[in-house]
Amino acid sequence: MVDILGQSRTHVRLLDMVSAAATHDVEVLIQGPSGVGKELYARRIHERSQRAAHAFIPVNCGALPAELFENELFGHRSGAFTGARTRTQGLVAEAEHGTLFLDEVDALPLAAQVKLLRFIQQKEYRPLGASRMQHSDVRIIAATNADLLEEARAGHFRFDLFFRLRVVPLEVPPLRERPEDIPPLLEHFLLRYAAEYGRPTVTFSDAALARLYAYPWPGNVRELENCARFLLCAHGGTRVDVSDLPLLPEPKREPPPAVAGAAPSAASAREPFQEAKRRVVDAFERAYLEESLVAHAGNIAAAARASGKHRRAFFELMRRHGLTER
C-alpha cells in the first residue's frame, strides 16, 4: 500500500479528497509541479478503489511519439503495418479492469487528444489493423505539471478533453507551501536510505535545520529525497551543518549580461541590419533560456510557464540554441 507522508492541513485535506475519489469510479485530474509525487497520489487512489486487484499502468505521455500514440495505447493486429508480424496488445488492454495513469497529459498533441477523448467517452477502441471495436473497462487518472486551463485557453489543449478528465480535480501544492511536511518526509527518507545503504543516519545543527525549513525546494519532494540520500552518502554518522547541505543557490534577480548589453554596439552598424538584429536576438534568447532554466532548477515546464511560452515551443527554442535538459 502506498504511504504518503505529511502533517500539514493542506496534506490532510488532500488525502481526504484522495479517499473520496477512490470510492467513485470517475476520472481524476491531478495537477501540481514536478516532483510533488503526483503518481503516488494516483496509485493511492487505485489501491483504495474496487480496481485494486488489477493493474495500475502508468504512461508518460511526454515520451510517446505522436505517430505511435494509437499503437502504444491500443495495440495492433498482425499485418497492420510494415513490420507488424505479430499481434500486440496496447497499454489499454494491459490496464483492463484496472487503472490507466496518463502522466504529463498536456504533452499530447491535439490529434492524439481527439483519439483519447473518444476513447474515454465511448469506452471502446479499435487496435490498428482490427476490423471491430473493442470495449474497455479501465479507469483514467491523468496528471500534469502545467496549468491545463491556461493551456486550453491558449489552444494547446482541448477544452472538451480538459473537462472530461477533470471530474475530480486534485491540486498537489509545492513543498514550499507546506513546510510542516518537511520533518516527517526528511525523517522517512533518512531512515529508509540509512537502512538501504547500511550507513548511520545524520543529525543536524540548528542552523542546518532552519535552512532546510526555509529553503523553497524548487525540486519539491524529489529534491528533498535526493538531499537525504546525498547526506547519508557523504556525511553518514556525522552532524550536518549549513555548509554540508547540497541546496541550490538562490536564483539571480538581475538580468544576465547578454540581456543587459543587448543594445546594438558601434560594430553592429558596420554589418547588415538583419544580421545585426539576428545576432542580438540570438544572444538574448540564449541568455534568457539559460537564466530561466537556472531560476527553475532545470524544470522546463516551469520555465516555459514563467516565460509565457508553451512547453513544446520552449523546448524547440532550447534545441535551436543547443541547450539540453538539466
Image (cartoon, grey):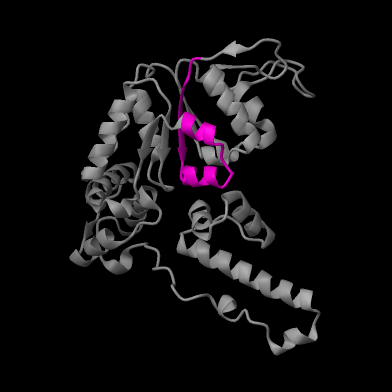
**Residue 240 seen by the camera:** no
Number of on-image labels:
0
**144 lies left or right of 279:** left
**Direction from residue 239 to residue 224 in the image, left or right:** right
Q: Height in image: 311 above or below 169?
A: below
Residue 170 belongs to magenta span? no
Q: Residue at x 56, y 47 (%)?
A: 154
Q: x%, y% of residue 19?
A: 28, 28
In the image, farthest residue toward the left: 206
Q: In which quarter of the image is the N terminus?
A: top left
Decide whether residue 139 is among the magenta residues.
yes
- Indicate whether 102 appears above or below 221: above
Left or right for 178, reference 30 = left
Write the residue at 36% across / 41% down.
171
In the rendered image, which quarter is residue 9 located in?
A: top left
Picture coordinates of residue 288, whole percent (x, y) = 57, 67
Q: Specify the segment rendered in magenta.
A: 137-164
Residue 131 spot, x, y in % from top left: 71, 11
Residue nearer the viewer, 249 or 301 = 301
- Residue beneath the point at 65% across and 26% down: 70
